């Protein structure tokens, strides 16, 4: 199944709001990418959490998508312990967030700040983070609602943006510094923010889905369904 809400929560990267207290909290954590995907989705699927929707079938499907290079985790660590994180799908210039969790204060917020940091490159103003639902937690960080029609109208151009370097196959287990989150600038403004690191020789290309995944996508009539989920999909939640 799939879900296409009438009003969708989205974050344009330049709209991210990082308070002084959150900036201070971020200094206490280390942000990593794709080093503990299964742990992140298992924490998001904790049956003790209210309104849970991630069952074993959904969990296994996203782990498979992670192995294929489509699903990614942004993890927040402190003293060797996973304290928070989020996971979602990276497709072109879109990151479709699925769920997030925290075990320490501000850890899920730091994960979102870390995600935006990863996406801040020369294409930053064309990228979009889809969080599905607008909650007070996410609104405080700059998330806003857009109508379904506006989202669908914008989506093809977003999907055409090159995949962020950090999500290109071969770049895994990345650790990021977080003293000062980068902020994207609108077109025309000067920006010399360093791009996300990648190993030498890693190609800067978009992902090509394998035949099995292409067949699944071919059954979908609108690109929004690919962006929302390539398998059974629930809703995004913020802790």
Image (cartoon, rainbow, N blue to C red):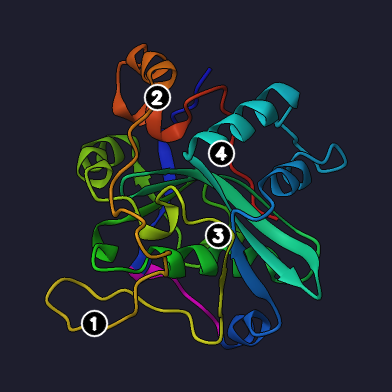
Q: Is residue 234 visible?
A: no
Q: What residue did someone put label 4 on?
A: 66
What residue occupies the far front of the structure in this picture?
Answer: 201
Disc 4 element: helix
What residue is disc 2 on?
210
Mark 1 residue element: loop
Image position, residue 23 (x, y; %): 58, 84
* 1 vs 4, front mark: 4
Q: Nearer the viewer, mark 1 or mark 2?
A: 2
Q: Earlier in the sequence, mark 1 or mark 4?
A: 4
Q: Residue 104: give x, y in percent of width and height.
A: 79, 68
Q: In the drawing, does residue 66 fall left or right of residue 76?
A: left
Q: Are marks 3 and 2 in contact (CB under 8 Å)?
A: no
Query: Of the residues tagged 2 and 4, which is closer to the observer?
Result: 2
Specify the segment rendered in magenta. Answer: 14-19
Q: Secondary structure at mark 3?
A: helix
CA gap, disc 3 and disc 2: 34 Å
Which numbered disc, 2 or 4, marks the residue that appears first in the sequence? 4
């Amino acid at each position: 199944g799939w879900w296409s809400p009438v009003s969708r929560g989205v974050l344009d990267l330049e709209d991210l709001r990082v308070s002084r207290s959150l900036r201070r909290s971020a200094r206490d954590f280390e942000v990593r990418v794709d080093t503990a995907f299964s742990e992140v989705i298992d924490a998001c699927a904790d049956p003790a959490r209210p309104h849970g929707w991630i069952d074993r079938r959904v969990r296994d499907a996203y782990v498979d998508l992670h192995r294929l290079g489509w699903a990614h985790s942004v993890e927040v660590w402190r003293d060797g312990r996973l304290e928070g994180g989020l996971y979602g799908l990276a497709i072109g210039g879109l990151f479709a967030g699925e769920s997030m969790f925290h075990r320490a204060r501000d850890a899920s917020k730091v994960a979102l700040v870390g995600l935006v940091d990863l996406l801040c490159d020369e294409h930053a103003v064309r990228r979009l983070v889809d969080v599905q639902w607008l909650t007070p937690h996410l609104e405080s960080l700059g998330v806003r609602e857009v109508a379904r029609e506006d989202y669908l109208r914008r989506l093809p151009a977003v999907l055409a943006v090159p995949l962020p370097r950090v999500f290109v196959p071969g770049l895994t287990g990345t650790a990021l510094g977080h003293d000062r989150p980068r902020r994207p600038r609108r077109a025309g403004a000067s920006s010399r923010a360093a791009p996300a690191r990648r190993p030498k020789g890693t190609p800067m290309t978009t992902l090509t889905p394998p035949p099995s995944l292409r067949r699944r996508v071919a059954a979908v009539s609108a690109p929004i369904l690919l962006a929302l989920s390539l398998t059974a999909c629930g809703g995004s939640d913020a802790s």
